[in-house]
Image (cartoon, coloured by chain):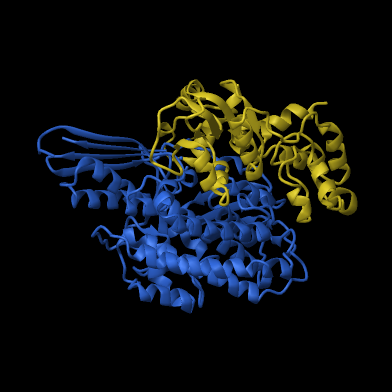
Chain colours: A blue, B yellow
């Protein structure tokens, strides 16, 4: 680490993220000169080939953007289309959407907390390696993840690309007894999640805090999942259709994902840390107590602690699913009729990784004229780069191998879904 | 493979949504026993540890859409004793093959402000268009039971037991009332490859073809039936042109 000497550290593949990308950190004379998260996942052009499709096709087509969080795409797209057509879906049809979303949060968070992120904190290459020393932890995590998938399967038809979601509601509403059968597994999932909060809170966290602009949805009385206004800790408070007036996407040369920022302010953070900071008071008592017990406060700004927040959200998602099932009454019809009309609709919901915004313009017969989709990983990309810079600046004395792992861990704080944002991360640290 | 070492498994990703390789991690009850039977030598979504090839079995997700990936799939083939494609993208080009029908320069300009930064081929092609493939598993997404069957079969040197019949057969087997006959709901079940367990009809919905065409489908006959149920020409085009667009197009001219 002698200053003035040229040095390149290279990890060919950043693993345990969803998709393909590279990271480049250039250090010269003890100064971090350049940080780039290079997303080279091949573009798939969803926004282009949605043009000319029928408005009813969005939940099936946009689900294929991401195998990890298809429900987020389905929910943002159907709510946008319903707005365009002047229809509101409420009551049990809406409650079922939140229930399906709880399944996706459990499946996605359990995958990330234990299989993608925890190995960083415990010094393992993978959850499979972790399982050799801590079989009980990994077995419980898999059980938790399985329960999320089962909930998605019962409500949505299957865990990857559910088939039951439609514009206006559902093809078939689940029977009460189908949902009731999930209760024991969800109660067990809540217990496993409570343990996860304790386990992750006991990890060693790098000392790093940032004064982020935190952005999340906000709906009275609810922890943000499926609806709400878009708010931030710096005074942003807008209805979803005002999104384009306040956020801008920028195309940079080193990434196939677009970078988002708040107009005139810059980068922001969405996802678990933002939701918890802005809406911790709306968690269920059991989730709130779990956070309090381990000293996790809404003022927390250490991105490495997002793994603890995700665990708290796992408790909440299981608890909320149990509440929704207890309150469930089978609706008279599985969907409301939706007739197309010329117009524009906007939808925004909380994907496990943060807010996911959709905007569609359709013509009078329901043909899509224009589509815009802003996934959470695009929105977090600038903040990830800023965190990388900040973490490397504080860790210049760390040996190269350990620094490479620390950089990967920093990226994983955001659970980046690169398939969503466009896809393999190569890590390249250059010192000169 | 010698008797004293575990067979090696590699999982590769091309243009895709990650959903099919996630199906392997979704085998929650079997994952740890699988990891005991095989050496997971390359699976970036799950582990940073990677081992050099050759690999006994490579699972490939995703389609080829860039010059770089055209080269990469050849390298994967050279390093693999057996290569199995998993899912509609790797087997049929995927939903992104819809761009094969369009002007890609226009597509790039719709999505990206600075098109010069984007490098992409003007088509999305299945893996078999580039290298020999030992087995193709259908589905958007694949069915995880079928994935386990394929892995087990290849590790034991036998053909996978995967029926190539239609979704209709699966409806009959599970006792689901025919949504097309009973309710007049348009359904691609008669021409679609089995594998999902006839999911959509069990949710009062017509099959929309995510497993691609079955062996020898009579697509022209079904097209007539769809039209008689009131679907216009555009709607029929759309329903075949989704997740297995290339594969269904080849079956449509009778």
In the figure, B103 relative to A360: above or below? above
Quadrant of residue A170 within the rendered picture = bottom right
Residue pictured at 37% horizontal, 62% vertical = A200
Asked whether residue A160 appears in the rendered view, the answer is yes
Q: In the figure, is residue A208 to the left or right of B52?
A: left
Q: Nearer the viewer, residue B47 or A313?
A: B47
Residue A219: x and y in percent read: 51, 73
Quadrant occupied by the N terminus of chain A: top left
Q: In the figure, is residue A112 to the left or right of A80?
A: left
Residue B172: x and y in percent read: 85, 47
Residue A108: x and y in percent read: 50, 55
Quadrant of residue B218 within the rendered picture = top right
In the figure, A81 relative to B108: above or below? below
List the single residue furthest toward the front: B4
Residue pictured at 55% horizontal, 33% vertical = B59
Q: Nearer the viewer, residue B5 or A41?
A: B5
Quadrant occupied by the C terminus of chain A: top left
């Amino acid at each position: 680490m002698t200053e003035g000497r040229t040095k390149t550290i290279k990890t060919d593949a950043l693993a345990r993220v969803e998709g393909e990308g590279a990271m480049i950190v250039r250090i010269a004379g003890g100064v971090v000169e350049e940080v780039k998260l290079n997303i080279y996942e091949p573009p798939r052009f969803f926004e282009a080939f949605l043009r000319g499709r029928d408005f009813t096709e969005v939940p099936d087509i946009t689900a294929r953007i991401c195998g990890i969080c298809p429900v987020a795409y389905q929910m943002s797209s159907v709510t946008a289309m319903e707005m365009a057509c002047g229809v509101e879906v409420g009551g049990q049809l809406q409650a079922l959407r939140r229930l399906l979303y709880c399944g996706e949060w459990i499946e996605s968070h359990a995958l990330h907390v234990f299989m993608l992120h925890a190995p960083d904190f415990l010094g393992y290459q993978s959850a499979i390696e972790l399982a050799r020393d801590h079989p009980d932890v990994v077995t419980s995590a898999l059980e938790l993840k399985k329960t999320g998938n089962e909930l998605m399967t019962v409500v949505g038809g299957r865990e990857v690309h559910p088939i039951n979601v439609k514009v206006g509601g559902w093809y078939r509403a689940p029977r009460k007894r189908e949902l009731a059968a999930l209760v024991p597994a969800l109660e067990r999932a809540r217990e496993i999640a409570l343990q996860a909060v304790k386990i992750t809170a006991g990890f060693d966290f790098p000392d790093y805090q940032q004064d982020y602009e935190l952005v999340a949805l906000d709906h009275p009385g609810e922890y943000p999942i499926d609806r709400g206004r878009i708010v931030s800790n710096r005074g942003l408070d807008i209805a979803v259709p005002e999104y384009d007036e306040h956020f801008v996407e920028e195309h940079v040369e080193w990434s196939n994902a677009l970078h988002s920022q708040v107009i005139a302010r810059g980068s922001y953070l969405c996802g678990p840390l933002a939701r918890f900071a802005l809406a911790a008071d709306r968690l269920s008592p059991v989730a709130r107590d779990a956070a309090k017990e381990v000293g996790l406060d809404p003022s927390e700004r250490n991105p490495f602690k997002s793994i603890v927040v995700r665990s708290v959200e796992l408790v909440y998602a299981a608890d909320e699913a149990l509440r929704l099932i207890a309150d469930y009454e089978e609706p008279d019809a599985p969907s409301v009729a939706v007739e197309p009309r010329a117009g524009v609709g906007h939808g925004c919901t909380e994907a496990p990784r943060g807010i996911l915004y959709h905007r569609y313009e359709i013509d009078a017969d329901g043909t899509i004229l224009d589509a815009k989709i802003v996934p959470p990983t695009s929105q977090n990309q600038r903040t990830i780069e800023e965190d990388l810079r900040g973490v490397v600046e504080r860790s210049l004395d760390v040996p190269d191998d350990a620094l490479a792992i620390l950089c990967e861990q920093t990226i994983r704080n955001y659970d980046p879904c690169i398939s969503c944002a466009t896809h393999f991360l190569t890590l390249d640290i250059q010192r000169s | 493979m010698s008797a004293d070492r575990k067979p090696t498994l590699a999982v590769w990703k091309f243009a895709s949504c990650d959903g099919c390789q996630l199906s392997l991690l979704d085998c929650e009850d079997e994952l740890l026993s699988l990891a005991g039977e095989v050496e997971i030598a390359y699976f970036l979504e799950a582990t940073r540890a990677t081992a050099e090839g050759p690999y006994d079995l490579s699972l490939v997700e995703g389609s080829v859409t860039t010059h770089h990936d055209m080269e990469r799939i050849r390298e994967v083939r050279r390093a693999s004793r057996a290569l199995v494609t998993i899912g509609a993208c790797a087997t049929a080009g995927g939903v992104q093959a819809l761009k094969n029908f369009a002007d890609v320069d226009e597509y790039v300009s719709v999505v990206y402000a600075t098109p010069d930064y984007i490098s992409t081929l003007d088509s999305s092609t299945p893996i078999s268009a580039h290298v020999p493939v030992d087995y193709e598993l259908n589905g958007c997404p694949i069915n995880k039971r079928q994935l386990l069957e394929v892995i087990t079969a290849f590790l034991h040197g036998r053909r996978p037991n995967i029926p190539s019949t239609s979704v209709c057969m699966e409806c009959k087997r599970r006792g689901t009332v025919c949504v097309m006959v009973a309710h007049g709901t348009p359904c691609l079940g008669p021409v679609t490859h089995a594998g999902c367990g006839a999911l959509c009809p069990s949710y009062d919905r017509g099959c929309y073809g995510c497993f691609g065409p079955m062996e020898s489908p009579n697509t022209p006959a079904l097209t007539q039936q769809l039209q008689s149920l009131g679907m216009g020409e555009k709607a029929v085009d759309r329903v075949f042109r989704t997740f297995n667009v290339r594969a269904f197009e080849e079956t449509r001219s009778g």
